[in-house]
Amino acid sequence: MKKDFIKCGITGCCLELLWTSFRGVRKKDYKLIGQTSVWMFPIYGMASVIKSVSRGLKKRHKDMLERGVIYTMGIYAVEYTTGSLLKRKNRCPWDYSNSRYNINGLVRLDYAPLWFAVGLMYENILNKE
């Protein structure tokens, strides 16, 4: 479990660095400087629960679409909850308030396809043995 937590934390932080660095391309900033926060490591690390969830879902013969939707909802729940807790202490590293499809500035509904893919990617990474 500890190894999976670390694997998910590192993977998530690396994905975030890539995502934030490539956003600069839209602004014609080709330095590709990404950023993340140390707070994100344990948040992404919590994706390690996908391993046991996926095994349970596969036993119930849930297809990829159903599993992806469940992971997306779980990711949104964790993002909203951790964001709310961090925001109380003025430590939340993200603020989606300026995005059209945000909920309290903590989640972006337009990121659903991204989280769907990330959830399935974590499932794949965690179940390789």
Image: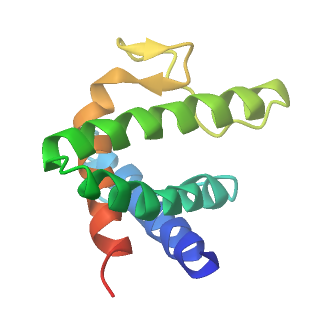
From this viewpoint, which residue is outermost toward the front?
A: 60
Q: Is residue 29 above or below residue 87?
A: below
- Residue 62: x and y in percent read 19, 46
- Residue 64: x and y in percent read 15, 49
Q: Is residue 25 left or right of residue 21?
A: left
Q: Is residue 17 left or right of residue 2?
A: left
Q: Is residue 33 visible?
A: no
Q: Is residue 93 above or below residue 59?
A: above
Q: Is residue 105 above or below residue 41?
A: above
- Residue 28: x and y in percent read 25, 45
- Closest to the observer: 4 or 21? 4
**Which residue is depicted at the point 76% across and 31% down?**
85
> Based on the displayed image, in which of its 4 quarters is residue 73 positioned?
top left
- Residue 9: x and y in percent read 55, 66
Q: Is residue 123 visible?
A: yes
Q: Is residue 88 left or right of residue 119?
A: right
Q: Is residue 62 left or right of residue 10?
A: left
- Closest to the observer: 41 or 90? 41
**Which residue is depicted at the point 75% across and 35% down?**
86
